[in-house]
Structure formats: C-alpha cells, structure tokens
Image (cartoon, rainbow, N blue to C red):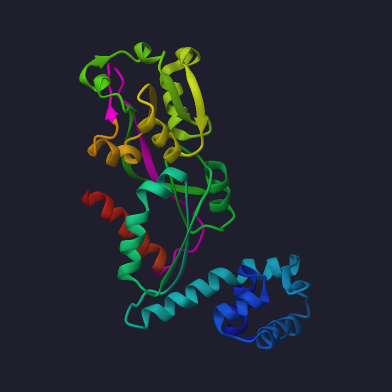
Amino acid sequence: MTIHDLEIFEKVVECTNLTLLSKRIGMSQPNISIHLKSLEEELNEKLFERIGKKLIINESGKLLHSKTKDFLLQYNEIKNIFSKNKLEGKINIGSTKTLSIYFLPNLLYEYKKAHKAVDINNITYGKELLIEKIKDGSIDIGFIESEIDSPDIIKEFLKKDELVVVSADKSLSKKITFIDQLFDKDWIIRDRSSGVTEIFFTYLGELKDLLNVSLELQNTLSIKKILATYPNTISCLSLESVDQEIKNKELFKIKVKNLDFNRNYYIIYHKNKFHSALFKSFKYFIQSSVSKV
C-alpha cells in the first residue's frame, strides 16, 4: 500500500465515473484500476461495487475513507510546509444562498488570485443541509446567517448585516412611517424558510398575519426585479443584497419607526475535523478581509 494508492482511492471516492476521473487527473483507467486492485488485495477487501463505468463505495471502502482522509490532509500539509509554504489542494465551502451570491464571490476571487494552486469548491445549501454537510465532513468550512446551536460545530462571528424595507416608490423614503402603515402594499418576500423572513416575522409577531403577502419567492434576484418593475410592491431584504440598487437609486430604503434589526454572519466548521494549512489560511483571509471593511 502506497500513499499514491490512497490518493487515487480518495479521488475515486470523490468522482465515481472512471472516464471523467481519467481525463481529470491525466491517468488511464487501467492504471487507476491497478492502484485500486493493489489496495483491495493488500486489505483483502473489496472497496467498491463496480456498476458499469462507475465505482460505488461500499461499507469497507467507507471505513477506509474515514481512516485515511485526515491522514492525507496532514500528508499534503507536510508537503506544503517543505515547498516554501506554497498552498495547494482543494477546499470545500458551503454557504447559504444570500452569502453565496452577495458576500462570498469577491472574497473567493481575491483568495484564488493569491493562491492559484488552490481549488475552491463552493456549493449553495439551505441551512439544515449545510449543517448536515458540516457534521458529516463533506464541507470543510461553511458560511451561514442563521443562529445555530450544535455541540459538534464551532461558530465564529464574521459581521452584522442590516435588514431593510425597500421599494421602488421614492416617495415612501421621504418620511418615517410605522410598519403597519405599509401592510396594504403588495409584499414580495423570501420564502418562510429564509433567515430574513424568519427574523422579520419574529419582529412582527402576531401582526404578520395582517401583512398583505402577494408572493413568496426563493430568489432575492427575482424579488428585486419585481420591486424595480412595480413601485406598489415592497419587501424586507438583507442590506447586503440590495446595497447596489440603493446606491443606483433603483430601490429606496424606507425609514420605519422602531424598526432596527440585524442578523449575524458566521463561519462554521466541525470541531473535530483536521484543520489543514489551507483551511487555516482561507479562514484567516476571510476574517481579516471582513475586519478591514
């Protein structure tokens, strides 16, 4: 059993299609099979079920994967240390929709520009699925705007994000109003699983039943398009998501009396997962970049 055998094994776990994997890593399918066969013969265990061109990991393979993935991370970190601290490898990032669209893109670009050998994999998840991905180790680091409480997950504060009421009706922005004076407008809101809507409805309490909700949508971009087209519509959204439209005077922030609420952005990660040099570098970069703003 060699480290290279284990590295090939890990790559097959990540990409079960041998044809695709062969092209990705520049190794022929027969050579990939030789490395896997070497492992299986030495361990005297089948590690995959072969279905057509795909290799589906079995229980023995899952056991080996659980024992080797952290070892390989440490091995790659050692290689990085002795290669003039050059960072390379892959970091798996998970983020909720708002952060994925409005918060992370520029930061990911800046980090990639500084570390060209790093492969960044960023996937958008709902809150519950993101937490599960952190717990099962599929994701190295996550970004979330919801409060969570899990003994397995470390949560570190990043920044505050203001929630604002916005509309394309400029006249509404020229005065201070009470929230119930806006109830008759056509409200276009994020779906009720959204952190923004959850916080907004908590603030409204029983008054939320008086809100004239015309549409619930999953996509903030769709909401902004409706707001810009129909001045009689209104919404409560993250300031981060409408900041550019407010600056361009496409949408206007409405001053609502006694309405002042924020939510927090957090970095989350599993407390027991091995933290590579790449993980530490990326986390520090995000935190230091946010603190400069």
- Quadrant in the rendering for residue 258: top left
**Which residue is drawn at the image coordinates 64% and 87% (left, top)?**
28
Taking the image as shown, residue 249 lies to the left or right of residue 31, namely left
Nearer to us in this view, 213 or 141:
213
Question: Does residue 271 belong to the magenta stretch?
Answer: yes
Q: Is residue 173 left or right of residue 130?
A: left
Along the horizontal axis of the image, is 182 left or right of 197?
A: left
- Taking 49 as reference, is 63 left or right? left
Q: What range of the chain is rendered magenta?
A: 252-277
- Residue 155: x and y, percent? 42, 46
The one of 163 and 5 positioned closer to us in this rendering:
163
Decide which of 66, 118 is in the foreground and name it: 118
Please tell me whether residue 276 is drawn above or below residue 150 in the rendered image. below
Residue 146 seen:
no
Residue at 69%, 87% in the rendered image: 30
* Residue 262, image x, y percentages: 33, 31
Q: Position of residue 64 (x, y in %)?
A: 67, 71
